[in-house]
């Protein structure tokens, strides 16, 4: 596809930043930094590789409008690419998978400007795709790695790339920025770095001289104090650079903590809390020494991040405290800039997070909090936003709010919210088919909605929705075969389908669904033997298979499943005695086991099973006590 020439009045851009929405924060920072950067005076007018060096770089194009809904690059994007002197690619695994980033690189190179393509790595590994076992870590899009011919087609010829590197322990923000600037201006990085250092030294000397002259040069002590202040300013600037590096390292580390299934075992609760506390202390220490809107925004982001991870880890009190701090800081920012759409979105998203935390705690104020978040997002018209991340945030809110509403006894309203959340997530997959996270969220929505249909007796709708989740999951699994979340979501979709088929009395279909769920969970347990949650879910499937046999009066067939489930659950409780959900599962399974033994007239064994159900019941269910007494009378 040939690019269209820009209109006569099209603005010229020094750079076009191509990025995945996942890396929006890095792209926005780079745009501002480039547009504010002033060329050292001694370089202005000198001849660079691409012509005379200007006083300023100029405007930077950063716009994703029209991309989500288009089947190809829009006319505006094509024109902007043609009008841009340089293409800067924000490189990460998300960018490497993005259809649109790849298309922008390919199209820009087809203009004959391949030598003006620059890269900035923010995550992942360059050239990781050369090693099949690390292919998911690849951060360079395919069109960046290979040359493009005049027709815009990729060739087998590999390109040589020198990239700025924002990953922890690499270039750091200042050096990475200078590398990109050097590439745009067509000068050597060392030359630019030396000029920048000289400019900073001259600035410090000039400021010091002016200050001392203003003081009348009457006091050596005063002069020394001023130089001490200059030194402190320099240290603070260095601290900010160090903070950027350390913050990225902490964020990446916390992401690995949150995503590591091995750290989700109950025995590592203390370690998880220590990790989160270390991160929290880091941010608080920095905050005590700094001030300004950018720092406030960074701290709000940090508290929101810590809240999210604490919630995932089950530390709900910590999560609530953290997200409330994030909301307070964002409200301060919004009060100073009421028209700032990013602050408004962040506030709505943080309020949504607070609603989820409160709901997980069972606190009634979750209702009002969810409603407030929804009102904020609707005021921003996020359902029609061109920013896919913003639309995804609305979908998450609708799904979570729907689950809460159902628990409050309003199933019709819950269904409406959850259906809208599913619709939004399906639209996100169509808009960005390379974003596997969106496909995973569709499965999550179908699980929740099909479960609601099952609980409200809408079994046909529940079966259709569960099948949609299964189809989505089976399509996603080959693309993420080792992702535990994909496998556990797919097994949950099969579990819902099996339950609904059982209620519809299609026992063969129910057994097939449960068997597939069991297969997925067994593989998870084998891959992650330390994760008790996976074993707990497998025990639940054993119980369901037993219940399926019991409902067909195949009580002898049911008992081995109940035995496997109770054995596994007792093993889990032995290692984590406080896991309430494991005790609930054990009580439930023992109840079904008691019914099967009663039906087989094994009364002594039935009494033991009903006793197990009563002893492990965390809900105080009186019917279990009655069943136990009835079993004893049958002895």
Image (cartoon, grey):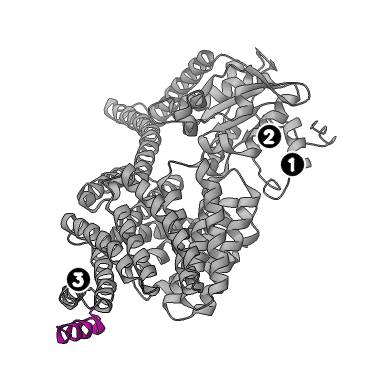
- What range is drawn magenta here? 620-635
- Which numbered disc, 3 or 1, marks the residue closer to the eye? 3
Question: Mark 2–mark 1 contact, CB under 8 Å?
Answer: yes
Would you say the magenta stretch is mainly helix, strand or loop?
helix
Q: Residue at x 79, y 36 (%)?
A: 10
| Distance between mark 3 and mark 1 Cα atoms | 59 Å
Residue 427 in the image: above or below residue 432: below
| Distance between mark 2 and mark 1 Cα atoms | 8 Å
User: Which quadrant would the N terminus be assigned to in this image?
Assistant: top right
Left or right placement of residue 528 versus residue 344 in this view: left
Going from the N terminus, do you reach mark 3 or mark 1 first?
Answer: 1
Q: Which mark is residue 252?
A: none
Mark 1 highlights which residue? 72
* Secondary element at image label 1: loop
Crowding around mark 1 (Cα neighbors within 10 Å: few <14, some 14 to 19, many 20+) is some
Mark 2 highlights which residue? 103
- Which numbered disc, 3 or 2, marks the residue closer to the eye? 3
Q: In this orientation, does residue 283 appear?
A: no
Question: Mark 3–mark 1 contact, CB under 8 Å?
Answer: no
Observer-nearest of 443 and 164 = 443
Crowding around mark 3 (Cα neighbors within 10 Å: few <14, some 14 to 19, many 20+) is some
Mark 3 highlights which residue? 616
Going from the N terminus, do you reach mark 3 or mark 2 first?
Answer: 2
Residue 417: quadrant of the picture: bottom right
Residue 588 coordinates in the image, percent (x, y): 28, 71
| Distance between mark 3 and mark 2 Cα atoms | 58 Å
Left or right placement of residue 130 versus residue 522 in this view: right
């Amino acid at each position: 596809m040939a690019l269209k020439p820009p209109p006569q009045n099209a603005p010229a851009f020094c750079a076009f930043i191509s990025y995945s929405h996942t890396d929006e924060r890095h792209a926005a920072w780079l745009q501002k930094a480039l547009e504010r950067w002033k060329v050292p005076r001694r370089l202005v007018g000198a001849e660079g590789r691409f012509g005379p060096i200007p006083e300023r770089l100029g405007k930077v194009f950063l716009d994703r409008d029209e991309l989500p809904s288009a089947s190809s690059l829009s006319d505006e994007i094509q024109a902007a690419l043609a009008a841009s002197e340089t293409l800067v690619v924000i490189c990460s695994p998300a960018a490497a998978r993005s259809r649109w980033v790849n298309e922008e690189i390919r199209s820009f190179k087809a203009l004959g400007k391949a030598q003006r393509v620059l890269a900035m790595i923010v995550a992942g590994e360059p050239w990781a795709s050369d090693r099949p076992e690390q292919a998911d870590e690849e951060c360079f899009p395919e069109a960046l790695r290979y040359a493009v011919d005049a027709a815009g087609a990729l060739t087998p010829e590999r390109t040589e790339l020198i990239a700025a590197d924002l990953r922890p322990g690499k270039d750091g923000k200042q050096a990475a920025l200078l590398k990109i600037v050097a590439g745009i201006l067509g000068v050597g990085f060392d030359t630019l770095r030396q000029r920048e250092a000289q400019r900073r030294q001259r600035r410090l000397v000039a400021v010091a001289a002016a200050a001392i002259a203003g003081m009348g040069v009457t006091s050596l002590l005063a002069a020394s104090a001023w130089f001490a202040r200059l030194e402190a300013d320099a240290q603070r600037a260095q601290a900010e650079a160090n903070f950027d590096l350390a913050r990225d390292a902490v964020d990446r580390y916390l992401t690995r903590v949150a995503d590591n299934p091995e750290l989700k075992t109950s025995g590592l609760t203390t370690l998880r809390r220590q990790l989160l506390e270390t991160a929290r202390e880091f941010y608080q220490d920095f905050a005590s020494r700094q001030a300004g809107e950018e720092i406030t925004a960074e701290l709000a982001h940090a508290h929101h991040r810590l809240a999210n991870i604490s919630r995932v880890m089950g530390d709900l009190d910590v999560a609530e405290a953290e997200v409330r701090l994030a909301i307070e800081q964002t409200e301060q920012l919004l009060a100073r800039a009421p028209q700032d759409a990013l602050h408004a979105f962040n506030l709505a998203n943080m309020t949504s997070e607070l609603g989820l935390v409160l709901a997980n705690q069972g606190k009634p104020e979750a209702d009002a909090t969810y409603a407030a978040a929804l009102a904020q997002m609707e005021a921003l018209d996020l359902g029609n936003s061109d920013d896919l991340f913003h639309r995804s945030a609305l979908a998450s809110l609708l799904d979570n709010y729907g689950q809460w509403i159902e628990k409050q006894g309003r199933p019709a309203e819950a269904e409406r919210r959850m259906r809208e959340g599913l619709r939004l997530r399906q639209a996100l997959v169509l808009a960005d088919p390379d974003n596997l996270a969106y496909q995973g969220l569709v499965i999550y929505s179908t699980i929740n909605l099909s479960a609601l249909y099952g609980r409200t007796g809408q079994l046909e709708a529940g079966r259709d929705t569960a099948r949609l989740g299964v189809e989505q999951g089976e399509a996603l699994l080959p693309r993420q075969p080792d992702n535990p979340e994909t496998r556990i979501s797919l097994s949950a979709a099969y579990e819902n389908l099996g339950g609904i088929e059982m209620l519809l009395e299609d026992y063969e279909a129910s057994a097939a669904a449960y068997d597939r769920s069991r297969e997925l969970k067994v593989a998870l347990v084998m891959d992650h033997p330390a994760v008790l949650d996976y074993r707990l879910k497998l025990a639940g499937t054993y119980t369901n298979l037993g219940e399926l046999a019991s409902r067909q009066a195949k009580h002898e067939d049911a008992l081995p499943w109940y035995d496997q489930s109770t054995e596994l659950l007792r093993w889990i409780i032995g290692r984590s005695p406080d896991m309430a959900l494991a005790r609930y599962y054990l009580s439930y399974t023992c109840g079904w086991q008691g019914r099967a033994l009663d039906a087989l007239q094994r009364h002594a064994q039935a009494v033991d099973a009903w006793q197990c159900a009563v002893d492990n019941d965390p809900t105080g269910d009186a019917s279990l006590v009655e069943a136990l007494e009835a079993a004893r009378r049958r002895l």
